[in-house]
Structures are given as C-alpha cells and as structure tokens.
C-alpha cells in the first residue's frame, strides 16, 4: 500500500508542474521553513504533550527542539489558518466566521487583498514556496440545488472550480499546491481535491489523505533540495478533523486503549503533563470533566465511544507516520539541520456531533461507488470506515483538551490553546527539549519568517495597501533571548470572545455574553471567576476588547462609550 500511495500522490502532484531550474550560485544559508498544521487536534493529544497516542516522529522533533506551553490559535480552522498565513487577526484578513461572504470587511470568507501571505512574502524574498493539504481560506462555490450539490459532493458530477480561482493557493504565492479547498473531506476520497488549479477527478485504490499530504511534501523537498534556494512548505492536514476515518491497521493499535473511559485517560494525561513540565500543577489544575455526572460505567455506548476515540488516535498516529517520512527526506537531502519545522493545531479538539447535521453543503450522502453514508446518532454503526460520518463528541474532546475547559469554537483555553513544537538543529540555541512559557499566537509566524528570511513585510503588494503586521517574531524564543511579546491578545468567533492582558483574561462563551474574569497565570484552567471581586478590571478589559473589536472589523461593531 505504501508504494501505491506514494506513486499515486507523486503522479497527482507532478501533473502540470514545471521543475525548478538549478542556478549556479552560492548556497543560500537562510533556513528552510516548514509549518505542519493539524486539524482539530487537542492540546494533550500528542505524546510529547501528555497524550497516550503514538507520535514518535513528532516527539523526536520536540525532544530535539522546543515546546511552547502558552501558544494560541483563534478557536476554529479557517480563522486560525487566515491568521497564520497573514500575520493579522483573522477579521483583518477577511475571515471572521467561515468561508461564506457576508459582505462585511471582516467577514468576506476569504483572505482579502489587504493582506499578504507567508508564501507571497517568502517567494518575493527568493524562497521556493509550496503547500500540501487543506486550504479552507477561500469562498466555497455551491451548486444551485441541494440535489446538484449532493451529486457533486458524491463525486457523481464534476465542475471546474471549488472556489473562485483567484483565491486558490497558487494565486496567493504558492508555486505548487496539492490538496483540498474546502474544510470537510472524506479522508479516503476527498472532495475539492486539486493539483494546482486542476481538479483531481479520481484517486487510486488505497488512497488516504494524510498519506498523500505528507508524501506530496516529501516530493517538494526532493525537488527543492536540488536547488540553491531555501524553501517554504505549508503542510496543512485534515486530520484528525471529523469524519472519523483511518486505515484499519492504525485503528487496531488502539482497540483497547480507551475502554477504560474518559476519566481514566484524562487523569493519566494530566499526570503526564505535569511530569513533562507542560503544566504547573500549582497553577493549572485539572478542570472538572464536562458532564461529570454521566459516568463511563453508566454509559450504554462504551464500545462505540471507545472505538471513536481509537479512530481519532489512529488519524493522529497515521499523520505522525507521514511526518516521519518528511523528516527522512530532509535527512537524505542534507536539509534537516537548516530546516525550521513548526508543528501545531488550528484549534482545540471538536465537541461537535457531526452526525446530527446529515448530508449537505460539505457532507456527502454517498461514497463514489454509491454506498450510503451513515449519519445515525444512535451509535449502532461503528466509526472508522469511509461510509460513516461520525465525530468524537464533547466528552472525548474534553479529554483531548486536558486540562482545560470547553473546546473548539470557544475562547476558553480548551478552544484556543495549541501545542507548538519548533525544531531547527542549526538555529535553536537553547537546551534540546526545553519548554517555552512565553505567550504566542498563530499570527506570529509572519513576523518570524520575515526576520529569518531577512526581508521586509510590505506596506503595499500587487497594487494593494497592506494592513500593518500584528504578530511578533518568535526568533528570540528560539535563541533563548528576551524579545518582544504581545501586551494584549483578543478573539471573537460567533460571539465567543476574550481579552488577555498580562495576568488577566476576560472571557465569555458563544452561548452566554456574561463576562468572566480569571488570573490566567495563577489559574490557567479558568476555574476561579474573579469578575465579582474585581468589577473595575472587568470594565477595563471590556473597554479594551471593544476598542479592539471596533478597529479590527469585528461584528457586530460595539457602541463606543
């Protein structure tokens, strides 16, 4: 199967591509940069962050690099990807919600022209640029009727474009692209799969999306390493985002791992996180499990729930296997020592019950060969195969986000706190395996690559005025030195919001606009609400959030007092 998948992905990748020409010049000493982004992976899922999932290759990067313990995303996939790619808050980049165009500046549903991407900046600075994986920062094209839409999703109807072509990655600075334009995919036969701008009409037997993403990255490394230019790769995974689908051999590894239930895994993860130094037990307690009155012993669906989490683990396991092939390609090409690799997640693990949505919009009703897809909520059909669309649900998501509260889409730590690993043998100057406690954000990658590429973030690009950079460089952290940090951070997504200023964090959920106040340094799990005790601090941070929202295209625009 491995040979089949590699060959197939290579064929898909190189159709219509032009091989880069070598130039006779001195080798550029600037580092290669690779950003590997997981989708809906929880803070504690990786082995090097406390999880029981087998991730030896990512663990290798962590033990020979750095782990950040206070790094943030924006709580959902497309907003986080927009901030990561542009160095701006996601509303400034046009993606305040999802990919629908609301015709408001912060809610256009695509990366707008007031931005530059990492690829555009690095390509202008002399880097090769390529991407494999999930784009999800362009407007989604829909068909005129639900039936036509489903036929398209089911691979039983073809159309030339999944998004406006000017919004494709190859029109935003990437020389090469192989991956999906939309957010949700069948991992064995993904919808919206393209090479460059050309739809991929079929995939070979044995295809799996995480394999294809990683194997395509390997192909890019082999090609670019023949040249004297440094390269930038954005490896954006769909895993472990629902639907829960993984090869049987990976699921088999975890068939008994989760039969003990939510509390057993959560407690074990917390203890391991403390022993690894990821969290300080004096300042970051294990929060109460969500819906703790419902015990595993009383759960009538133990077998199904244990299997669901086993598939989630298998998806991460499989992704890690492919990352091992990426590391191997870098070693064999002589590029590993001077390659900076980042690994992180776009948001906390997902609490969504995707089965209740059923088919439609981005969810097929049948497989390509006509098998009906199961969306039943009664947990009678086991997850993991291509004809099932299921998710882990809120209780396992709570486990994945140990030790924090809440999950994806919320501004509590469970939604926004991401693992971040940085690996760069030639450039990291602190002790291998160190843990960095400084606060960072996904929009910091732009300032980081700007510094490393020895280039300047533009005020104008392609005739458009560019919004000033919001992120701060992480290079000082890699060097073990003091550097600029965020004085304040903010977020808003479907009503969930926060303001973090020094030791204080003001936060509300998407379902309740009541502000809650926490000393996020002394109470990292957000257990002791101090809003009543410090009402003036609530007002101060609320005004700061409102000022930020007013100036950063957040809707609804707050009334200024």
Image: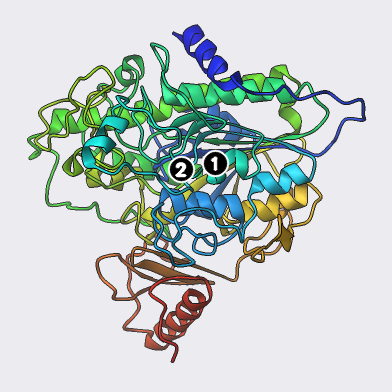
> Where residue 382 appears, x then y in whole percent?
17, 25
Neighbourhood count class around disc 1 (C-alpha, 10 Å): few under 14, some 14–19, many 20 upward: many
> Where residue 157 appears, x then y in whole percent?
32, 27
Q: CA distance from mark 2 to mark 1?
A: 7 Å
Q: Is residue 445 left or right of residue 427?
A: left
The relative height of residue 285 versus residue 19 in the rendered view (above or below) is below
Q: Which residue is mark 2?
A: 163
> Where residue 350 appears, x then y in whole percent?
32, 46
Neighbourhood count class around disc 2 (C-alpha, 10 Å): few under 14, some 14–19, many 20 upward: many
Along the line of sight, which residue is nearer the eye, 101 or 482?
101
Mark carried by residue 381 = none
Along the line of sight, which residue is nearer the eye, 219 or 75?
219
Q: Which residue is mark 1?
A: 168
Check if mark 2's residue and mark 1's residue have beta carbons within 8 Å.
yes
The relative height of residue 268 versus residue 534 in the rendered view (above or below) is above
Seen from this angle, which residue lies furthest front?
144
Residue at left offset 40%, top offset 71%: 555
The relative height of residue 264 versus residue 201 in the rendered view (above or below) is below
Whether residue 534 is visible? yes
Q: Is residue 159 left or right of residue 332?
A: left
Seen from this angle, which residue lies furthest bottom?
561
Q: Earlier in the sequence, mark 2 or mark 1?
A: 2
- Label 1 SS: loop
Along the line of sight, which residue is nearer the eye, 530 or 339?
339
- Label 2 SS: loop
Residue at left offset 73%, top offset 44%: 122
Whether residue 324 is visible? no
Rendered image coloring scheme: rainbow
Residue at left offset 50%, top offset 31%: 179
Q: Quadrant of the C terminus?
A: bottom left
> Where residue 497 appears, x then y in whole percent?
39, 68
């Amino acid at each position: 199967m491995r040979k089949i998948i590699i060959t197939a992905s290579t064929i898909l990748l190189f159709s219509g591509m032009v091989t880069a020409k070598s130039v006779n010049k001195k080798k550029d000493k600037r580092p290669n940069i690779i950003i590997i982004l997981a989708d809906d992976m929880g803070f504690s899922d990786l082995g090097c962050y406390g999880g029981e999932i087998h991730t030896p290759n990512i663990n290798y990067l962590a033990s020979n690099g750095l782990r950040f313990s206070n790094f943030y995303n924006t709580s959902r996939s497309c907003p986080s990807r927009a901030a990561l790619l542009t160095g701006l808050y996601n509303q400034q980049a046009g993606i305040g919600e999802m990919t629908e165009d609301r015709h408001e500046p912060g809610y256009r549903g695509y990366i707008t022209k007031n931005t530059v991407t990492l690829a555009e900046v690095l390509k202008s600075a002399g880097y090769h640029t390529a991407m494999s994986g999930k784009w999800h920062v362009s407007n989604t094209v829909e068909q005129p009727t639900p039936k036509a839409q489903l036929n398209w999703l089911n691979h039983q109807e073809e159309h030339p474009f999944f998004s406006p072509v000017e919004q494709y990655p190859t029109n935003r600075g990437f020389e090469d692209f192989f991956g999906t334009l939309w957010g949700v995919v069948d991992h064995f036969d993904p919808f919206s799969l393209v090479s460059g701008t050309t739809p991929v009409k079929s995939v070979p037997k044995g295809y799996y999306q995480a394999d294809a993403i990683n194997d395509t990255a390997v192909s890019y490394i082999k090609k670019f390493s023949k040249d004297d230019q440094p390269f930038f790769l954005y490896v954006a995974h769909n895993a472990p985002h629902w639907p829960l689908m993984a090869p049987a051999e990976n699921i088999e590894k975890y068939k008994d791992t989760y039969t003990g239930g939510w509390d057993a895994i959560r407690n074990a993860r917390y203890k391991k996180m403390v022993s690894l130094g990821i969290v300080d037990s004096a300042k970051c307690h294990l929060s109460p499990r969500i819906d703790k009155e419902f015990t595993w012993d009383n759960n009538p669906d133990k077998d199904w729930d244990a299997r669901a989490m086993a598939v989630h683990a298998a998806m991460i396991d499989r992704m890690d296997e492919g990352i091992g092939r990426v590391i191997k390609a870098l070693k064999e090409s002589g590029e590993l020592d001077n390659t900076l690799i980042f690994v992180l997640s776009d948001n906390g693990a997902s609490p969504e019950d995707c089965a209740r949505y059923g088919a439609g919009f981005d969810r097929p009703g049948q497989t390509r060969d006509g098998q009906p897809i199961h969306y039943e909520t009664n947990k009678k059909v086991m997850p993991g195969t291509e004809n099932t669309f299921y998710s882990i649900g809120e209780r396992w998501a709570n486990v994945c986000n140990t030790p924090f509260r809440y999950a994806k889409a919320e501004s509590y730590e469970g939604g926004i706190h991401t693992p971040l690993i940085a690996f760069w043998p030639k450039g990291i100057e602190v002790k291998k395996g160190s843990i960095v406690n400084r606060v960072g954000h996904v929009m910091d990658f732009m300032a980081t690559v700007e510094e490393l590429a020895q280039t300047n973030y533009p005020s104008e690009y392609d005739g458009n005025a560019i919004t000033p950079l919001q992120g701060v460089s992480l290079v000082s952290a890699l060097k073990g030195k003091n550097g600029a940090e965020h004085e304040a951070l903010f977020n808003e997504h479907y009503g969930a919001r926060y303001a973090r200023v020094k030791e204080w964090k003001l936060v509300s959920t998407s379902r309740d606009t009541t502000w809650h106040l926490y000393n996020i340094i002394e109470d990292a799990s957000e257990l002791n609400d101090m809003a009543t005790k410090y009402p003036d601090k609530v007002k101060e941070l609320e005004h700061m959030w409102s000022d930020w929202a007013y100036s950063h295209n957040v809707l609804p625009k707050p009334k200024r007092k």
